[in-house]
Image (spheres, helix red, strand yellow):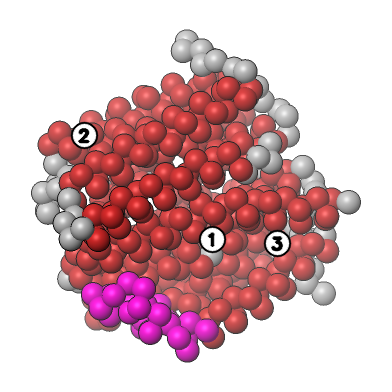
Amino acid sequence: MPGIQVSRLIYKNFVWRFFFYFTSLLLNIAIARILGAEISGNFNFFLNDLSFFLLIGSLSLESGIIYYVSKNESRETLLASFSVIWTALASGIISAMFYLFYSDQHGIFSGSFLVFSCITYLTGIFLTTYFTAFFYSRDNYKAPNVVLSISNLLLFLFICGQSLRGIVNIKLFFFLFFMFSILQGVVIAGIWFIQNGYSVKMKPVKLSSLSPVLVYSLKALIGNIAYFLLYRIDYWFVEYYCSAKALGNYIQVSKVGQMLVLPLVIMGGTLFPQSSKDNISFGSPVFKKILRIVSIIYLTGALFTLIAGKQLILFVWGNDYDEMYFPLLLMLPGIIFLAISYIFSPIFAGKGKVEYNVYISLVTLAVVIVFNFLLIPGWGIQGAALATSVGFLMMMILYVIIANKKMGMSLQ
């Protein structure tokens, strides 16, 4: 039964990816608490800038890998070789751009350390993203998430160990963070090549043979850029209009929001390839069941956050993050709307209708930008949170309308 198969894969995916995301949460809280709102905010803001160009440089090739490899319509060896070649090329170009044009007001990411940070982080994340997609296209969720989780745990133990000794060497921690980024990418790619008995063929690849994958990926790229900006564009507004402490607080609010929708991100990683295999659609009973369960769980979670959120924030993050609670409350409705939207987007993509995701994300982005301009100058980070909720409400409405009109969805 396709429904039973999808449910089992969702569970298997959730177990292994939850392990990774839980360790990521531990590491993020440790960095935020030990380094403080200003330094951790600057660090996350640098990663945010780097990640934007990384997204553009990636071409969203992982989307094409999952789609075509899941359907057995593309040669994995050719795609793998191209992924490695493109990783080296894109990482070098973006690193050179940052060296020439990037300016860090705090002076941490500059000169040779800036180049080191860019090359190691970009190379590692490119390899991790691409080869995790190869694993996921074959329903293998264990290998990449074990590697990533171990990396997070080692970094967590290091920074906590330094904190317990009373001396935190910030530059050394950042050095290890970026070294681990490239190591985990190399290990994940290496495991894939070893398991499949392939070798990297460093020779020119005919783009015509990869054109279907690249065309699909570039369509997905537009939507992914819009999604990225939906999550992060408020960072730039907040950085411009608000204090460094407010930026550090708001980035953590945003990270909490991203953490809360992680179960749906994990689920989407399963629904996408299963949708491409026609094991799930908007008319299947499993889709309606998932939609109902998600709505109930997130409404319950929002009620819990309303009651206990303030005390929990101060306990976990510390007194330096006393500005998080009210923006989080204003963002909660948007988190619920986004969680529901995450059930729709991978099914659209799996059915080859990735352009619907693109249109919806672009409209939503326009709404968020307008409300950021209107609200942040007067309301600060609370205005940023409210703008996010308004945008994700629009996203959910558009997904429901298009699924009903174009894909025959019925919630009855």
Q: Give SS at disc 3.
A: helix
* Crowd class of label 2 (few under 14; some 14 to 19; many from 20; radius 10 Å): many
Judge left or right: residue 6 versus residue 79. Answer: right
Q: Quadrant of residue 199?
A: top right
Tell me the tag on residue 247: none
> Looking at the picture, which amino acid does disc 1 mark?
Leu
Q: Which residue carries the number 2 mark? A: 115
Q: CA distance from mark 2 to mark 1?
A: 31 Å
> Looking at the picture, which amino acid does disc 2 mark?
Val
Could you tell which of marks 2 and 1 lies nearer the N-terminus?
2
* Crowd class of label 1 (few under 14; some 14 to 19; many from 20; radius 10 Å): some
Q: Is residue 303 above or below residue 5?
A: below
Q: CA distance from mark 3 to mark 2?
A: 45 Å
Does the magenta segment cover residue 80?
no
Task: Identify the residue at horizontal 66%, vertical 78% (top origin).
Answer: 296
Q: Is residue 246 above or below residue 168?
A: below
Q: Give SS at disc 2.
A: helix
Residues tagged 3 and 1 counted as in contact (Cβ below 8 A): no
- In depth, the one of 177 and 134 nearer the eye is 177
Image coordinates of residue 156 in percent, x first then y, are 36, 53
Could you tell which of marks 3 and 1 lies nearer the N-terminus?
1
Extreme residue toward the front, this view: 165
Tell me the tag on residue 262: 1
- In depth, the one of 283 and 38 nearer the eye is 38
Does the magenta segment cover residue 321?
yes
Image coordinates of residue 44 in percent, x first then y, are 29, 56
Q: CA distance from mark 3 to mark 1?
A: 23 Å
The region drawn magenta spans: 304-329
